């Protein structure tokens, strides 16, 4: 049996929506992007959402809007994908890495210890779709002594007058924290709609705006939309209308817009996301939990907090009391059975671009412990229970064979 790791979910509804876009004669940013933005806003419970060409672009655009630049510090977890750090570096700012907890998510105690007068933002990452401790993070940035450290530069920072919380929610579309979906727990939340994500547009994402008063989130949306289209006062769809060719460039913007032909995929998926796509992911997740709970060597994902549940984006199984080398040997055995698995993620200090800048994995022991024992199993709606059973057997056999 051959089981891929994360194929996209493409059904007849997706095909029909994409074909409708192709037949419309309009395939770049236009009505389908707007429709998807509205659906995302409604689903996440936020005032406004901007469709963009990737979560990476979205995070960079949002931090740029907040005025983050040369010499500023942005706190991120060491256990994340490289994009979380790269967006900070692209702006000339400094990524300040801190360790995570056993649940893979950023340590609030480590955040507090890392805050300085140069700290402008915190970017918590919802690993595997499990929400971070946003209650504690929000309490931290609003605490009087932490606010007193904040040195504002630029109008947006002066208006917020504290450290910005921007959630890297690339994994957590549909996750629930304290009874509410992710999107409303940070000032800004950025989702990814990459090909391997729960909801996909092949490439793409969304910036969800939840800034407090006195910000007008709809006005911020308009600004970010303008900046995502080269600072051009009219998008291509508006310009295409008869007599509407004239435009202006009012800001040195970027090219980060999401095309309609891609938004069409997500538009079809979001209409069945909760009742079908998310429910089927939970079925697979629960199947694994039940099967592996019988084995003392298996450390199940720690996602059982009341009123909180993940988006079931990954199933990060950890094997107790093994080395990184044995983990790799287990993966080879699983692959030999025809099952594709993965590892999420290599902590940033293990990557050349960061180790060359002085980051050392020895400073992040929990991150390394999580990584060295972690194997991500396939989890997607198309998996049937027979395939899940085969995956479980393949993992068990591999663990036993390498013991």
Image: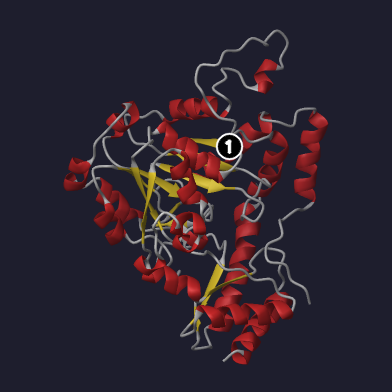
Q: Mark 1 points at which residue?
A: 51
Residue name at image x 51 percent, y 78 percent: 324
Residue name at image x 69 percent, y 71 percent: 340
Whether residue 304 appears in this view of the structure is: no
Q: Which secondary structure lies at badge 1?
A: strand
* Image coordinates for residue 237, horizontal then vertical, percent: 68, 22
Residue most extreme to the front: 356
Query: Relative to the observer, which residue lies in front, 122 or 301?
Result: 122
Query: Horizontal placement of 386 versus 275: left or right?
Result: right
Q: Please, is residue 358 above or below residue 264 in the view?
A: below
* Image coordinates for residue 76, horizontal then vertical, percent: 39, 53
Residue name at image x 65 percent, y 49 percent: 200
Residue name at image x 65 percent, y 56 percent: 196
* Image coordinates for residue 192, horizontal then vertical, percent: 57, 48
Query: Horizontal placement of 262 versus 79: left or right?
Result: right
Residue most extreme to the top: 243
């Amino acid at each position: 049996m051959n089981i891929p790791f994360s194929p996209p979910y493409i059904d007849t509804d997706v095909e029909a929506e994409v074909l409708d876009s192709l037949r419309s004669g309009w395939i770049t940013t236009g009505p389908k992007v707007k429709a998807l933005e509205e659906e995302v806003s409604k689903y996440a419970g936020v005032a406004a959402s901007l469709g963009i060409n990737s979560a990476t672009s979205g995070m960079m655009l949002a931090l740029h809007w907040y005025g983050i630049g040369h010499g500023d510090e942005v706190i991120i977890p060491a256990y994340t994908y490289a994009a979380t750090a790269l967006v900070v570096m692209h702006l000339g700012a400094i990524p300040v890495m801190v360790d995570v907890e056993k649940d893979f998510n950023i340590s609030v105690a480590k955040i507090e210890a890392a805050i300085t007068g140069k700290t402008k933002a915190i970017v918590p990452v919802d690993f595997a779709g499990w929400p971070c401790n946003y209650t504690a993070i929000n309490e931290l940035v609003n605490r009087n002594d932490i606010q007193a450290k904040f040195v504002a530069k630029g109008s947006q920072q002066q208006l917020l007058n504290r450290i910005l919380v921007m959630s890297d929610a690339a994994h957590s579309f549909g996750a629930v924290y304290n009874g509410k979906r992710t999107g409303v727990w940070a000032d800004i939340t950025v989702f990814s709609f990459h090909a391997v994500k729960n909801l996909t547009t092949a490439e793409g994402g969304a910036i969800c705006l939840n800034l407090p008063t006195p910000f007008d989130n709809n006005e911020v949306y308009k600004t970010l939309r303008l900046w995502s289209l080269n600072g051009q006062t009219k998008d291509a769809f508006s310009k295409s209308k008869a007599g509407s060719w004239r435009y202006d460039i009012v800001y040195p913007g970027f090219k980060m817009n999401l095309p309609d032909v891609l938004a069409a995929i997500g538009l079809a998926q979001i209409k069945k996301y909760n009742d079908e796509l998310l429910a089927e992911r939970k079925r697979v997740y629960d199947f694994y939990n039940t099967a592996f709970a019988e084995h003392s060597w298996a450390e199940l994902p720690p996602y059982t907090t009341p009123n909180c549940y993940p988006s079931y984006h990954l199933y990060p199984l950890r094997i107790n009391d093994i080395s990184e080398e044995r983990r790799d040997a287990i993966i080879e055995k699983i692959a030999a059975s025809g099952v594709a698995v993965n590892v999420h993620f290599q902590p940033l200090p293990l990557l050349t671009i960061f180790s060359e800048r002085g980051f050392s994995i020895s400073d992040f022991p929990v991150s390394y412990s999580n990584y060295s024992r972690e194997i991500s199993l396939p989890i997607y709606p198309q998996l049937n229970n027979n395939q899940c059973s085969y995956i479980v057997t393949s993992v068990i056999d591999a663990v036993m064979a390498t013991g």
